[in-house]
Each structure stands twice: as structure tokens, then as C-alpha cells.
Image: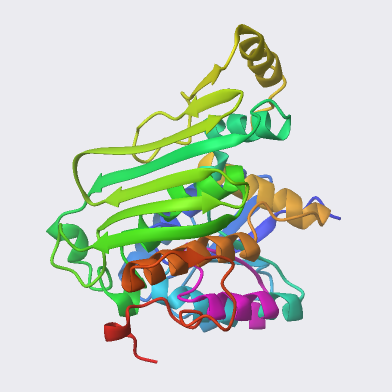
Amino acid sequence: MTDSKLRIGVVGSGIGQSHIEAYQRFPNLFEVVAICDLDRARAESVAETYHLPRMVTDLADLCRMDDLEVIDICTPSFLHYPHTRQALAAGKHVVCEKPVAGSLKDVDQLIAAEAESGKRVMPIFQYRYGHGIQKLKFLVEQGVAGRAYLTTVETAWRRRAPYYAVPWRGKWETELGGALVTLAIHAHDLLSYILGPVKSVFARTKTLVNPIETEDCVSASLEMADGSLASLSVTTGSVVEISRHRFCFSHLTAESNTQPYHNSFEPWTYSGDSPEVQVQIHETLARFEPLPERFPGQFYRFYQALRHNTALPVTLADARASLELVTALYTSAETGRSVELPITAEHPKYASWRPREVHHG
């Protein structure tokens, strides 16, 4: 174990800038030493803005930097898998934006590559670290919540033509999916983060809001492995944007705020089924120890995991569970049938969740 800084190289200047800002919140833990972007002018601008000493336009150049410990991948979705493989092969730890890959087969290959490399891969699920959802996680872990009954998850956002003017968006080949893969994936991850695995799903998907290849409206019914039920609704056609989670347990009901990009943050309400439970909620939450939220929260935990050789805050197994749900939802929507989980290598959608008419092998 060492107390030295982790030296980071970031690939991609879009969401990558938010990652850089989060790392720079902890100057004693991290040092971002390089930015990589195909657009040289954009890379130079980011390097200047964040006072980064190096700028490159080729990931291979980043991989050759001996003093880098971590490569943080913030490139378009279809590049996540090959870029993660490339960084692991170069002997680097990897942080990777969602989705880490375009199929369960690719995720399983990443898991094998990670094990072989001796390095570690952390997918991004930063919404797990809002204090609202963290307090619910604490209540569940402390045995206060009781048995889960029903959970509802709403992702009702608005995306217009300019959003899809970005060439790689709205296409199966490059975005790897629609709202299920790119927008609602965080909200759905929070469901499994609190309740654990999904047992079965039934879903309907449609493209109603924008003239794109991929889906932009979803309605789904889930049975969780714990026996509880959940419903998921997703659209990019909501004039008023909201995200909402509502968890009904035997001892309490927890409800998020509805801010579309901040709903895992406080305020949340935790309503006990009796005055005695309400007191127990209050006393339990008095022992809650808040850590940083969102990207800073995930990166802070990442540092601790690497330096103390403990479990990563988010693992490839977590990413696999997320993409297993995606695969099941797309399979159900295509077949009109309920789909059981887990999904193994024998499943027809194991190698690609794309619809048959656009699947290219």
C-alpha cells in the first residue's frame, strides 16, 4: 500500500471534462496528467482549461506513458470495449463510461481480460453515490426496510433533434442502443443496487419521439429475485423532465426527488410504517456517514480500493448485470414474451442485443 497519487490519462473531451473536474477535487489523491482526443484543437483547449501537462490524439500514445496508472475512457459507446482491451493490454487500470460493451459476450471477454491482466476495470455508475440513495442502501443493510414489495422507476426526459445531430447517436452500430442503454441505464442500475438481481422481465419498446433507429419509449414489468415486483418507464418525449424512484418495503416507503439528473441526491423521504419504525429510521440515519457524491464519490472510493486492495465500488460484474437487464428487455420487446434471467452464452442475444433486422453478425 502507498499513499501516492494515482496518475490518470483521460480519453475523450465530452463527459471526460466532468471526470477531470471530479479528479481535481482531490489533488492529494489524483493527478490528471494527459488528455487524449482525436480533435487536436479540442484536446488543446481542455489541456489549457484544466492545466494538464500533456495532450495526445492517439490512445496508443497514452498507453505508452509509463508513469500513467489509470486510463479513463470517455469515448463514444461503440469504442468502450476495444479501448478498454487496449488499455488493459498496456498494463493500465481502467475507468470506463457506460455502457462498457455492446453485448454480454464482450462483457464476459472484458472480465476474462481483466483477470488475465492483473489490473482492474471500474465501470461508471456515479448516481449510486447520491446521499439519498446511499441512505436507503444503509437502511436496507441495517435491516430497517424489511421485505421489498414494489418499486417504480421513471426516466421521463426530453431529447430533440439537435441531440441526435451528433453522428453516433440514435444508431445501433455506434450508440449500441436507445434510451435503455444511454439514458435510463443509471436509473435501472439503482434498482439492482438496492434490491439485487432481476429474475424476469416483460417489455415493450417503441420509437415515437424522434426519427432514429433505436427506441425512445419503454414500458417494462420486472420480477426481482427477492420476489418483489418493479415497473420501469422510459421516454425522451416528456416536456417536463423527471427521474423518480419509489421503493415500497414492508417497514418503509422511500421516495426520491424528481430532479432528472440529480434524483439520487437528497432530498428523499423515508416514511416508516409505524411511529416506532420512523424513530428507528431517524436513529439509523443519524449513524450514516456521508462521503462525496456523484463522480467525486465514485473516484474517491476507487482510490481507496486500489490503494488498499479492496473491492472496487463498481465492478464489471455490476456492469454485466446492467447489460443483462438491457439484453432481456430487448429480447422481450422483440419476441413479445417474458424473459428469464440470468442470460448465459447459449442465449440467442448473448452476442448482440440488437434487433434481428439490424444485427450484422
The answer to whether any part of residue 173 appears in the image is yes
Whole-percent x, y for residue 267 in the image: 46, 23
Residue 51 horizontal/vertical position (percent)? 48, 54
Spot occupied by residue 130 in the image (x, y as percentages of width and height): 53, 36
Of residues 342 and 14, which is closer to you in this image? 342
314 sits left or right of 183 in the view: right
- The residue under the point 66% across, 28% down is 139
Instruction: Assess whether residue 178 is covered by the magenta stretch.
Output: no
Q: How many marks?
A: 0
**What's the residue at 28%, 73% (across, down)?**
168
Does 307 sit left or right of 224 as displayed? right
Quadrant location of residue 167? bottom left
Which quadrant: the C terminus? bottom left
Determine the residue located farthest toward the bottom in the rendered image: 361
Compared to 279, does 102 lie above or below? below
Residue placed most toward the observer, 85 or 251: 251
Please give the name of the residue rendered at 61% of the width and 52% of the height, measured from the top-left corner.
225
- Colour setting: rainbow
- Is 106 one of the magenta-colored residues? yes
Taking depth in this image into account, of 80 and 128 the one nearest to the observer is: 128
List the single residue furthest toward the front: 337
Q: Give the range drawn in magenta.
A: 88-112
Q: In the rendered image, is residue 62 in sight?
A: no
Q: Residue furthest top?
A: 275
In the displayed structure, 230 sits above or below 288; it is: below
Classify residue 241 by image quadrant: top left
Whole-percent x, y for residue 340 in the image: 52, 65
Q: In which quarter of the image is the N terminus?
A: bottom right
28 in relation to 45, above or below: above
